[in-house]
Structure formats: C-alpha cells, structure tokens
Amino acid sequence: MQDRDSEIPADRTSRRQSRKYWPGLAISLLGLAVLIQLTMLGRDTFREFPRLISDLGQPAAWRSARYSQGRRFAQYIRFLNQVIPPEGRVVLPPDSAAPRAIATTPLMQFFLLPRRVINCTGPDCLETLSLQDTAVLVTGGFPGPEILSQGRLEQFDADWGVLLPLEQAPNNPPPPQGYSHATEIARDFLLATAWLASLTLGGFMFVRQLLSPTWGTARLALGYGLGLALLTLLLALASLVGIPLGRETVLAITLLLPGAAGASHLVRRKQAIPSDQGTVEQTPASKPTRLDPWPVLFVLLAGLAALFSFGQGFHATDELVLWGVKGYGIATDGAIRSVTQWGTNTVAYPLHIPLAIAASRLLLGEALPAAKLVFPAYALALSLLLYQTLRQLGLRRAIAGLATLAAITTPLVFRHGTLAYANLALSFYLFAALALLALAVALRDPPPAPGILLLSGAMFASAAWTRPEGLAFSWLMMGVALLAAYFIRKVWIGWRRLALLISPLLAYSAFWLWLNSEVYSLPLGRAGLAGEAAEQFLSGNLHLQEALYIIRYLPAGLLEAGSWGLLGILTLLVLLVLLFIVGLRRLHRTKGLDEFPGKATASAALIMALCGWVYLLAIAGLYYLASYDTAHDISWWVSTGLDRMLMPGLLLAWAGGVGWLQVLIPGLTEPPVPK
C-alpha cells in the first residue's frame, strides 16, 4: 500500500514535467511552419515589390490591365479610352481574329466602362449591325476592307487599332486619374480606411450588445463583417424599391448604421436580449492583463496585403469578369436590376461583393481603387476572429497566435486577401457563425445566451449573401453543428433559442427569393444543372470515374504546398491525432472517465472540426454535381477553383483540431481562473 501511494507523487511530477515541455514543442513546430510559409511569401513578395512600387502612380485601370494581361494591353486600353466616347458602343472581334482577352466581353466591359460592349461571334456579324456611334476594335484582319472603308481607322500599333465613325467628333476625355505624389496615395488610402472604419463602428455597436467583452478584438472583426453586410443588404433593398444607388445613398446608409445601433442600444436597456456573458470556460484568455502583440502582427500582414491589393488593381480572372465588372456596372447604372448585363451569368450570384465594390466606387471613385481594400480588411477580420476563437477555446496566447499565422500566411489565404473574390468573405462569415454557435452550445448548463445565437444567425445570413452556395451551405452547417452538439454534449438549445438562431437566415431566404425574381428573371447558364444531374444519376449514369477523380484530388489538393503551404499537411496530421483521441475517449468512458477538465472547450473545438470536415466533403459532393456539366469536364472544374472552395472547411478543421488537441497534449491551455 505504501509503495502504491509513493507512485502517485511520482506520476504527478511526470505530468508536470510533460506539461512544461509540450507547449515548447508545439510552439517550436508551429513557429517553424510559420517561418517556412513566411519565406515562401517573402520570396514572391520581394520579386513583385519593385515593379509594384514603380506602377503605383499609374491610373487604376492601367494597373489592372497591366497585371492582368501585360503592358501592351494596358497601353491599348488607355488608347481606347482616349479615342472612344464614353456614350458610344464597342464591337469586339471574334475569338478567331483576336487575342482571347480582347475578344472576351466581360473583360472588355470592365476596362471600357461606361461604354456598351458587343461581342462579334463571326467575321460577318458587322453586315447586319449599324455602325452609327459604334467603334470596332481592329485586330488580326478583322474587320474586312469593306467595313474599314466605312469609318476612320485609328491605329494603336501595327496589329491593333480601332475603327471610329466618320462623323464622330474628336474625343477629348479628361486625363486618366493617377498619382504624382505619395501623399495623394496616402490621402485616398486614409479616406477608404475611414469609410471601412465607420462601417466597422456601426457593426461593432450592434455586436457589443450581443457578445461579451471577453471576445476582445474579435468584436471589431465581427463588427466589420456585420457592418459591410448590412450596408450591401440595405443598398439592395433600396434599389429594389426604386431608390437610385448613388453617392448620397451610400453615404446615408453608412451614417445610418451607427445611429440605428445606438437606438437599438437604448431599446435594449428597457427590454434586452441577454448577451453572451463569457467564454465556455473562464480562463486567463478571457481576462487580458497586458498588451497583446499578436493583433499588431495581423495588422502588418493585412497592410502588406492591402498594398498588393490596390497596387495591382483588379487583375485576376473573376475579379474582372465577375465581381468587379458587376460592381462597376451597378455603380454605372445606379441599380441592381441590370446586373445580368454585366459580366458572366452562369448562376444567380448574391450581390454582397458587387454592391460593396459599387458602394466604394460611388463614394470614393476608382483612383486607388478603394474597393480593393475591402478584401485585406476581411483578411484582418478573419485573423482577429481566428485568434480570439482559439483564445476562447483556452489555448495559450503564443499557440493561438502561431496557429493563426499558420492559417493566414498560407499562399492561398494571403493571396485571397489581395483579390476581389468572394471566397475569403465567405470563409470569414461561416467561420464566425460556426465558432459562435459551437462555443454557445458546448455548455450543458447554463443554456446559451440568446445574443450569441442571434449573432451567429446573422453571420450565417451574411454567408448566404456572399456566394451562390452560401445559402444551402449555411443551412447545412447550422444543422450539422446543432446535431453535433446534441450527440457530443447532449445539448438541445430549445425552440425559442432555435427560433432566434434561424430567424436571420429565414429572413434572408425570403429576401433572396424576392431579389432573385426581380433581378435574375431570365434563364441562366447553369441554373438547371442540378436537375439534369439528378435525371442522369437516376438513369444509371453515375459518373464513377469523375467521383474517383475528385476523391483522389481532395487529399492531394490539401497537400499542395503552392496553395496551402504546410497548413493542409498539419490539418491532416491533426485529424489523425483526433481520430486517435476519439478511440482513447471511448476507452475512458468504459472506465467512468467521461468528464475531464476542459471538456466543454474541447467539445466546442470538436464541433468546429467536425463542421470543417463535413464542409470539405460537401464541397466534394458539389463538384461531383458539377461533373454533369457538358461544357467542361471535371478536370477543368477542379483545376479552376476547388482549392479556394475548400477554404472555409479547412480553416474550421484547423482551428477546431488545434483547439481539441488540448485533450491529448498537456500545457496547451491556460490554467483555469481561480473561482
């Protein structure tokens, strides 16, 4: 008996020693991963930096064209904008007679705004087209001599030019807006930052009523996402009821948000919705006692992303042919009903990103372009939210900070912080919604506060407003999180709290049905793909080869260092560890060890990780559906966008997995706050 008692202190001493060494090992491994990824980013950054700085003084349209198609194309676009009147229309050459960029209607729509662009599908298309007030782009022997004789040829170089109407008066446009001094760039940058900060303030004033101060800077991040989503939703509503979208409308709604938040605060003082009162389990993470350096690092990274974002303008494919041109088109027309006339129209796209771009253009112009700062701001918001979520899960400050850097310094995530794509915004909203929900439902007692559930629902609705798959995936992931909470923690939030959670998404769903019927009334390119796929599947056409292709690519894609750095490898390793832990926990349950310190936070992390992996599988299912598209084979679909579609799921799987490692590895979390 005495020998057995003597073993207990020795065992405790061993645990203390392991608790001392494990955090250091985790910090070293995460730090090495971050260092490798920063080296990868730095290599690409330093290569582009000199050219970027030298081009900053050029007009935004020139920079967009330069980084999209090259210097010659940029000079050609400048030439066309100088000689073609803004009220004219432009005929593009067919694909067979011109470089692909010049023959692509959405691309040239962006660069030739506000001019109307017509695509010539064949060499003879001009025979039935009136050339009055019409300019024809001249390339590769197009148009023929008979058409050339009907107008005035202006040659850009030996191969490219434009045919103008004979009676057209010389066009004398104002010089394109560029920069001659760094102070001018700083002025426009600060104006754009002030506008985004005002939206953040409006959103924050709502968030602070619903979420505890223990969430720290995450409340600012959530305020940015909520403020921008409310702005674009109100702009869409204004346009649907007939209010023109102009600078005054954008400014009025921007100023309205803080006022509305203040009014709601006064109402809440009489009849309040209780906010979240703290973390799942109180730790020193919820009581900051000294300056936290990690948000400063996130701001510096976001600043670097912002420099590349506005410095390169709109240059990636979907920036130009989808989100950017639709945003600029809405700003040009002052309405959303004409959005299908701009850019690609394969599906009914939610208008959050186009309206954010339109609002920026209307309010601040396009010299910077200010709209490109929206996306580095999303990167910063995601960084702050991810970091504070890991802190809410109880992780030590250094581990939470390095795990966040490991996520945001991956090449794909950082690159999307510089691009006007919707994927990073969707990742932010879904991560926010599921992190809030997981942390709210992980406790068995007391029940989750209504405020945090309402805020989670608002983030789900914002995700639905961001990308076409957002609505279906928001409902799916909400259901997965609630089911996981029930089976993991035996938690049911009750019907009243469930109504609060789903009410924002229900309201948005009704709004989307209205907007969809008003804006997307005509048939779209791939609107019937789901029905066609179901019909073929039921007839026995199972696309097994395509399914195997997706299954093989998914893990290989996560291991692709050019996209994910080391994050994919680390996340898969964490998954293996989690599966090992699940096995251990089952053994522990048979010994009566179901409960253990940190169970609630570990359960919240497990819910997040589970949602992340379900999301990844759901994306694989979505691409299986896309394999029934007859226009492209599955390899085209996978190579052109699967990596960025995985972003929300991988971030959830990473954060949840790291948070749940506290079950196996001692010392990752802060010690509990003494009661």
Image (tube, grey):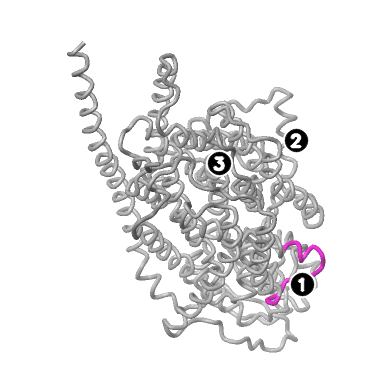
Q: Is residue 481 above or below residue 9?
A: below
Give residue 468's position: percent from left, percent from top: 66, 48
Residue positioned most to the top: 1
As drawn, the label of residue 537 is none
The residue beneath circle 2 is 531
How many badges with numbers are in the image? 3
Labels 2 and 3: the sequence-earlier one: 3
Give residue 160's position: percent from left, percent from top: 57, 72
Looking at the image, which residue is at 41% across and 45% down? 564
The residue beneath circle 3 is 440
Q: CA distance from mark 3 to mark 1?
A: 41 Å
Q: Quadrant of residue 322?
A: bottom right
Pointers 2 and 3 in contact (CB under 8 A)?
Answer: no
Q: Nearer the viewer, residue 630 or 441?
A: 441
Q: Nearer the viewer, residue 457 or 1?
A: 1
The residue beneath circle 1 is 244
Give residue 248's position: percent from left, percent from top: 70, 77
Q: Is residue 379 above or below residue 542?
A: below
Q: Disc 2 residue type?
A: Gly
Q: Disc 3 residue type?
A: Ala
Q: CA distance from mark 2 to mark 3?
A: 38 Å
